[in-house]
Image (cartoon, grey):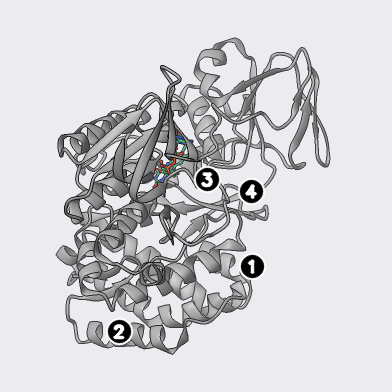
């Protein structure tokens, strides 16, 4: 077997990369392998009530729309852009793989595990037959599993479970729920939020739910992550980031300001929150979650017995009739940054925050249009996933510094502006509206100072004169009311 690119992983990242690469590069052959039996990555094993937490409008691969860009009329997401269910995401990636295959330039081999290099090429095992095949890769291996998600269905429960204690993975909650008298949800993140919300939606009274939260988390208000017709809300959110970033002297001050402005939310405003993983909630979800008052904050669970839970900082009572729901899988991994473009290898990673699919597609675009790895890495430095509030300054300042570099690259800026995966895709259609202009001006007023201040809070370098100058140039242009702006998504026409 021969191929130009061997992509390891047919999740969102591997498919979004392959999709843009074949759209932008001529005469390349791509082979995507995944050890799972279908494309879609972690979505294949997701819990039954999972949904995208972000709108479908900017999720998936660049060339295929997900959903209908509809605004929901009812439920907790009312007024916001639709969010696909897990099943819809799986169907979508299956169709995307079929479309890629139909180009004649991409092969998607599911049920195939990449083993590493061998003497006669890269080794791939067919998991049905056990046969190991050598693949000669003419150009590059693309590692689309470096940030592989750790999910409830596949992670190992990180505490002991004694006999008599009832513990299920969140995937089994719907089937196990009817036989429990009360529930203890374990975990601080989005999966635990989803488990609590599912219980409340299924008429479990809040006083039958105990929430064991090792840490409290920050969430974006979903109203600030709406695209297209509501793109002004997205700019509003970015302007609040920039304003807080420019003013805060410490991380605590930064988060105080982000909360005071309504940009970030925490479930209990009286408890310090240290976790930040870039997920979001609507005001309605938040109000529902606040009805759960029995919150245990004694650190991580060490052991669950029939009548007590042992935690890092103490014990809590429980009972054999209580269903303990494990939501402690990490989700996004904290793999350390490494160069995205290396000789013979591309390692897909986050570049711009909150944009996993966009980032993979962007890397595909650069692979197609730039020859030099140093130049590609300059335009695409890695930006590891955040886990705590200390990561926020680095994540934001790297995003903004990188986007400033894109401004000097007209072809890249044009691609960003037109990409359906771009958070600010609606901006060019709404750039002159007051709901966009007002936050845009606030954003432009603060972003340069924010880059510098956040760089200091992060202990990393300030952006340097070249980038600051580019941002200032863009600000002058915008003040002259040209429709091209510097913003959270790079250059938008
Ligand atoms: C529950 C959940 C909800 C999320 N919701 C959102 C959201 O709403 N919006 C958003 O933007 N992001 C969201 N994310 C972030 C998420 O990480 C991305 O959306 C994306 O799906 C990750 O895809 P991936 O391809 O990087 O990784 P994965 O989906 O983990 O895919 C990696 C793939 O690599 C394969 N693989 C690994 N090793 C090998 C090998 N040796 N050989 C062959 N194949 C291999 C695996 O089988 C897997 O299919 C969510 C994440 C989680 C966990």
Name the image quarter holding the N terminus: top left
Compared across the picture, whether 1 is left or right of 298 comes to left
Residue at x 63%, y 37% (from the top left corner): 187
Please tell me whether residue 395 is drawn above or below residue 289 in the rendered image: below
Labels 1 and 4: the sequence-earlier one = 4
**What is the secondary structure assignment of the residue under circle 4?**
loop
Residue at image mark 4:
216
* Residue where numbered disc 2 is placed: 475
**SS label for mark 1:** helix
- Name the N-terminal-most of marks 4 and 3: 4
- Quickly name the residue at label 1: 252
SS under mark 3: loop
- Residue drawn 61% across the image and 78% down it: 249
Confirm if mark 3 falls within 8 A of ligand 1: yes
Distance from Cα at disc 2 to Cα at disc 3: 34 Å
Badge nearest the viewer, 1 or 2: 2
């Amino acid at each position: 077997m021969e191929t130009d690119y061997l992509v390891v992983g047919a999740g969102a990242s591997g498919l979004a990369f392959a999709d843009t690469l074949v759209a932008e590069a001529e005469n390349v052959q791509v082979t995507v392998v995944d050890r799972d039996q279908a494309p879609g990555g972690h979505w294949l094993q997701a819990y039954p009530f999972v949904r995208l937490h972000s709108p479908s409008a900017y999720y998936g691969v660049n060339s295929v729309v997900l959903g209908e860009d509809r605004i929901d009329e009812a439920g907790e997401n009312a007024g916001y852009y639709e969010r696909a269910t897990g099943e819809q995401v799986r169907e979508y990636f299956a169709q995307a793989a079929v479309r890629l295959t139909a180009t004649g330039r991409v092969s998607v081999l599911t049920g195939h595990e990449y083993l590493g290099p061998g003497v006669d090429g890269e080794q791939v095992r067919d998991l049905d037959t056990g046969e190991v095949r050598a693949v000669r890769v003419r150009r590059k291996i693309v590692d689309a599993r470096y940030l592989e998600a750790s999910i409830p269905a596949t992670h190992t429960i990180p505490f002991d479970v004694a006999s008599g204690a009832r513990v299920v993975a969140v995937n089994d909650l719907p089937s196990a729920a009817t036989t429990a008298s009360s529930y203890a949800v374990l975990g601080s993140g989005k999966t635990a939020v989803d488990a609590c919300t599912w219980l409340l939606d299924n008429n479990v009274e809040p006083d039958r739910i105990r929430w064991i939260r090792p840490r409290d988390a920050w969430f974006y208000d979903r109203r600030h992550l709406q695209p297209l017709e509501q793109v002004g809300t997205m700019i509003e959110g970015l302007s609040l980031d920039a304003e807080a970033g420019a003013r805060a002297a410490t991380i605590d001050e930064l988060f105080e300001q982000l909360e005071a402005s309504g940009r970030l939310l925490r479930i209990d405003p009286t408890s310090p929150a240290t976790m930040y993983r870039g997920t979001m909630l609507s005001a309605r979800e938040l109000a529902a979650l606040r009805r759960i008052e029995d919150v245990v904050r004694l650190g991580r669970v060490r052991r669950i017995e029939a009548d007590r839970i042992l935690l890092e900082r103490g014990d809590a009572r429980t009972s054999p009739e209580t269903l303990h729901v494990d939501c402690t899988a990490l989700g996004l991994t904290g793999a350390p940054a490494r160069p995205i473009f290396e000789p013979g290898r591309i390692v897909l990673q986050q570049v711009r925050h909150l944009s996993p699919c966009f980032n993979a597609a962007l890397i595909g675009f650069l692979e197609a249009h730039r020859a030099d790895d140093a130049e590609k890495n300059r335009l695409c430095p890695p930006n590891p996933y955040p886990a705590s509030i200390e990561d926020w300054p680095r994540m934001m300042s790297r995003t903004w510094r990188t986007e400033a570099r894109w401004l000097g690259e007209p072809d890249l800026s044009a691609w960003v502006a037109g990409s359906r995966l771009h958070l600010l895709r609606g901006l060019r259609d709404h750039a002159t509206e007051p709901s966009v202009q007002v936050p845009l001006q606030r954003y432009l007023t603060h972003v340069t100072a924010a880059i510098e201040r956040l760089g200091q809070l992060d202990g990393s370098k300030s952006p340097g004169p070249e980038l600051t100058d580019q941002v200032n140039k863009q600000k002058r242009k915008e003040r002259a009311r040209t429709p091209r702006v510097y913003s959270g998504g790079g250059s938008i026409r």
